[in-house]
Amino acid sequence: MAAVVGPDPLFGLRNNFYVGAYQGAINSSEIPNLSPDDAVERDCLVYRSYIALGSYQLVISEIDSSAATPLQAVKLLALYLSSPNNKETVISSLHEWLADPAVGSNPILRLIAGTIFMHEQDYNEALKHTNAGGTMELHALNVQIFLKMHRSDYAEKQLRVMQAVDEDHALTQLANAWLNLAVGGSKIQEAYLIFQDFSERYQMTSLVLNGKAVCCMHKGEFDEAETLLLEALNRDAKDPETLANLVVCSLHLGKPSSRYLSQLKLSHPEHTLVVRASAAEEAFDRAVQTVG
């Protein structure tokens, strides 16, 4: 007789994390009677929530060398994000662990590796560790990586795999929205409806508000997008995507955007928009000097 599978004790915690309700995930993490494996996964989600909130040092100080491999991997992510000076050491450690047959196949380690190499824009290296899938998070990360590579055809294949496993899973829905945004056209409204559904089913977060706002911008509804983004800014004044989207939105509305760009430069100097803006400014200065 098949074993009866009980309710997933981490269901609520996971969904809070997936939709960007990081403080909510932390606050709901006191779950009794977890198995050892579930307890490690719970701790990983809690520490990843702290990382998403920028509390890198808390994670670094609390995870010691005796912790399980998934937690050590999460600590590597905190180290990587906490300072550019740590990048080389973290990537070296990652390669070492991934090459170790005893721990290299751990799904959380592969997920963190994919995340770090995606940050490095080394998409081929990221896919080496994520492409085999195995968990919904790894499939969702593959969708993100393929979209960054402008390969929506491969992203769609990953989405099909996720839909076959669980069509209603929060990550399947999110991946579907990301793909619809990338494809554009009539798919934008489908993406908007997914984010709208999220805003009704889950806690309203910067992630969901940004999703809706980007859909509005694609549809040319910049006033509506600005309203959503200002609400997101009220929730998290340093969220890089909110600030970046406000820069774009303000430019389309003919409003000043320099304050949002300055905030983004201060809090996230390596953000793509900051890097591109700096490169454009340098190119302009060089052109002016040539003319002069």
Image: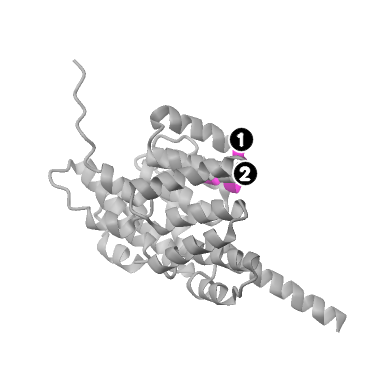
- For marks 2 and 1, give the CA distance: 14 Å
Pick out the residue farthest to the top. 1
Look at the numbered disc 1 and give the secondary structure of its residue: helix
- Most common SS among magenta residues: helix
Which residue of the protein is positioned furthest toward the right in this rendering?
Answer: 291
According to the picture, the residue beneath numbered tag 2 turns out to be: 184
Which part of the image, by quadrant, shows the C terminus?
bottom right
Residue flagged by tag 2: what amino acid is it? Gly
Q: Secondary structure at mark 2?
A: loop
Residue type at tag 1: Asp
Looking at the picture, how far across and down is residue 40, in whole percent? 25, 47
Looking at the rendering, the stretch of residues picked out in magenta corresponds to: 144-152
Does residue 44 appear left or right of residue 249 in this picture?
left
Q: Please name the residue shown 40% across and 29% down the image.
A: 165
Q: Which residue is mark 1?
A: 153
Quarter of the image where one finds residue 163: top left
Instruction: Name which quarter of the figure residue 49 lies in.
Output: bottom left
Q: How is the image coloured?
A: one colour
Vertical placement of residue 160 versus 67, above or below: above
Which numbered marker is on residue 234? none
Looking at the picture, does residue 169 appear above or below residue 112? above
Give the image location of residue 185, x and y in percent.
64, 42
Residue 140 visible in the shown view: yes
